[in-house]
Amino acid sequence: MADGTPPTRAVALLPVTVVGRKLARLRARLHRSRLDVALASGVDPWSDAELLIRATQLSALRTRRGLAEALEKIVTIAESPRPEPATRCIRLRRHAVLQQRECLLTLAAHIQAPAPVPIAVLAQLRLLVGDPSSPIYRGGAPADDLATAVDNCVAGLDPSTGRLAL
């Protein structure tokens, strides 16, 4: 630069060696919760190698389908009159989940389709289904936060209207 300061890098550098790339992927998996929080809040995934790797992992169709299945399973558990023995340890806020049923199922349908999905939305959904402090689960964030989180995801999918076709 003209003032003597080095230019800032717009895109993070990924490790060049095979071992370096494997270590970076491992670090991204180990720190996925922290990275997901950053990505969900809108941090640019191109700004850091670990964020870029985590964004790539989240955007993989396999991961997206897993998130969609988790959303569908949460709705199914909430709808069941009597929980299966294997799901008794999952302490869902059934009423809150059922209030958001249509939006959760629509989000699930959108993220498993091959169309692009914003990384922030995928990270928010991953935190919603995978974090025990999520408003989906008893003992997590307040139940009212579920509607806000779902609305944020919907708005992230279609920022022009803030709505999805249900």
Image (cartoon, rainbow, N blue to C red):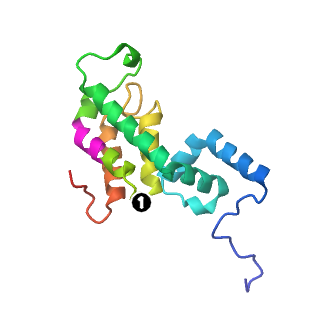
> Which residue sits furthest top?
85
Hey, which quadrant is residue 138 in on the image?
top left
Could you tell me what secondary structure mostly forms the magenta stretch? helix
Give the quadrant of the N terminus: bottom right
- The location of residue 102, given as percent across then percent down, is 23, 42
Residue at 37%, 34% in the rendered image:
135
**Can residue 45 be spotted in the picture?**
yes
Q: On the image, numbered disc 1 is attached to which residue? A: 116
- Secondary-structure class at tag 1: loop
Residue at 26%, 45% in the rendered image:
103
Side (left or right) of 48 relative to 148: right
- The location of residue 61, given as percent across then percent down, is 47, 50
Side (left or right) of 103 relative to 88: left
Residue at 24%, 27% in the rendered image:
79
Hey, which quadrant is residue 84 in on the image?
top left
Instruction: Please name the amino acid that badge 1 sits on.
Output: Pro
Front one among 104 and 72: 72
Q: Residues within 10 Å of mark 1 (few under 14, many from 20)?
A: few
**Can residue 123 be spotted in the picture?**
no
- The location of residue 74, given as percent across then percent down, is 34, 31
Q: Range of the magenta residues? A: 99-106
User: Is 155 rendered above or below residue 11?
Assistant: above
Side (left or right) of 95 relative to 118: left
Residue at 46%, 40% in the rendered image:
127
